[in-house]
């Protein structure tokens, strides 16, 4: 009789920590919490009405995603975006994402195309309303449509971490360069069209994915340089 109650007690703080993680990540994305700023436990416990346990669990998850650095005996600090960080991310992501896209195309092309088509409608809506938060979320969903269908669990785990960072760049970029919304739609429509064709060669799909990631990196870097010069 004690087991169901115990299960509830175990699950609740996990869910709460996920909520705290989401709140803090959003604040980092929109600039409410800035680079170098310390996340003070006592202040956040009071502000969020949570105990130390879920807050520290959220800190550990944010560190895993690359958004903060936990320094022993000093605390948790928000990490910044650097040019090297973006270069490293693009290089690794390009190779891994090509592998996931070509694998997904061979395994479940129709399923991926159906998912992409539905997500693309949401992309169009986000572009029309210039909803950056929604745009960042559906961007991850779009790429996950083939990453999750690759059939490779190790690959999915590595790309998950890379995409947390990529989403940060994405939000960062569109907050200062919203005029590129239309180009954003076109670049994803090209990827979608590849999965809509039943006889695309692997090297052609690879070329499209690499070009997409490389162009995205150039846009992120351009936005980074504009902000850095201010």
Image (tube, rainbow, N blue to C red):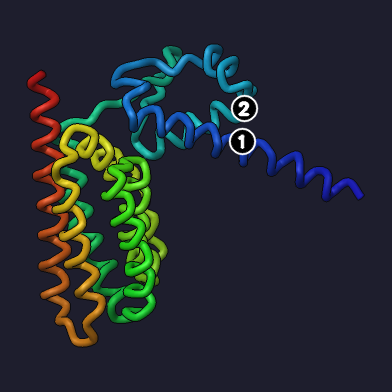
Point out residue 139 in the picture as x, y percentages from the top left corner: 31, 53
Question: What label sits on residue 53 in the rendered view?
Answer: 2
| Residue furthest front as drawn | 128
In this rendered view, identify the residue nearer to me: 175 or 166: 175
Closer to viewer: mark 1 or mark 2: 1
The residue drawn where x is 58% and y is 18% is 45
Within 10 Å of the Cα at label 2, are there few (<14), some (14-19), or many (20+) other Cα atoms? some
The residue drawn where x is 34% and y is 64% is 147
Does residue 100 appear left or right of residue 223 in this picture? Answer: right
Is disc 2 placed on a helix, strand or loop? helix
Which numbered disc, 1 or 2, marks the residue that appears first in the sequence?
Answer: 1
Above or below, 19 against 201 in this view is above
Q: Quadrant of residue 207?
A: bottom left
Question: Is residue 155 at all visible to an observer of this figure?
Answer: no
Question: What label sits on residue 16 in the rendered view?
Answer: 1
The residue drawn where x is 28% and y is 43% is 130
Question: Is residue 219 at all visible to an observer of this figure?
Answer: yes
In this rendered view, identify the residue nearer to me: 159 or 194: 194
The residue drawn where x is 21% and y is 61% is 188
Within 10 Å of the Cα at label 1, are there few (<14), some (14-19), or many (20+) other Cα atoms? some
Point out residue 5 in the picture as x, y percentages from the top left corner: 83, 44
Q: CA distance from mark 1 to mark 2?
A: 10 Å
Point out residue 133 in the picture as x, y percentages from the top left corner: 36, 41
Point out residue 141 in the picture as x, y percentages from the top left corner: 37, 57
Above or below, 185 against 196 in this view is above
Is disc 1 placed on a helix, strand or loop? helix
In this rendered view, identify the residue nearer to me: 227 or 73: 227
Above or below, 17 against 106 in this view is above
Task: For the C terminus, give its image quadrant.
Answer: top left
Q: Quadrant of residue 112?
A: bottom left
């Amino acid at each position: 009789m004690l087991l169901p109650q115990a299960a509830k007690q175990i699950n609740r703080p996990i869910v709460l920590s996920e909520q705290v993680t989401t709140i803090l990540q959003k604040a980092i994305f929109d600039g409410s919490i800035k680079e170098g700023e310390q996340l003070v436990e006592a202040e956040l416990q009071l502000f969020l009405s949570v105990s130390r346990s879920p807050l520290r669990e959220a800190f550990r998850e944010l560190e895993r995603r690359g958004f903060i650095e936990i320094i022993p005996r000093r605390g948790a600090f928000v990490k910044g975006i650097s040019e090297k960080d973006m270069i490293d991310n693009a290089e690794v992501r390009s190779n891994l994402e090509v592998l996931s896209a070509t694998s997904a195309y061979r395994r479940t092309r129709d399923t991926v195309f159906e998912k992409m088509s539905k997500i693309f409608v949401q992309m169009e809506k986000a572009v029309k309303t210039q909803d950056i938060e929604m745009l960042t979320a559906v961007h991850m969903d779009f790429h996950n449509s083939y990453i999750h269908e690759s059939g490779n669990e190790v690959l999915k785990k590595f790309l998950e971490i890379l995409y947390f960072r990529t989403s940060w760049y994405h939000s960062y970029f569109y907050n200062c360069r919203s005029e590129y919304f239309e180009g954003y739609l076109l670049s994803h429509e090209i990827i979608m069209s590849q999965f809509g064709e039943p006889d695309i060669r692997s090297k052609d799909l690879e070329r499209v994915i690499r070009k997409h990631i490389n162009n995205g990196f150039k846009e992120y870097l351009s936005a980074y340089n504009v902000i850095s010069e201010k």
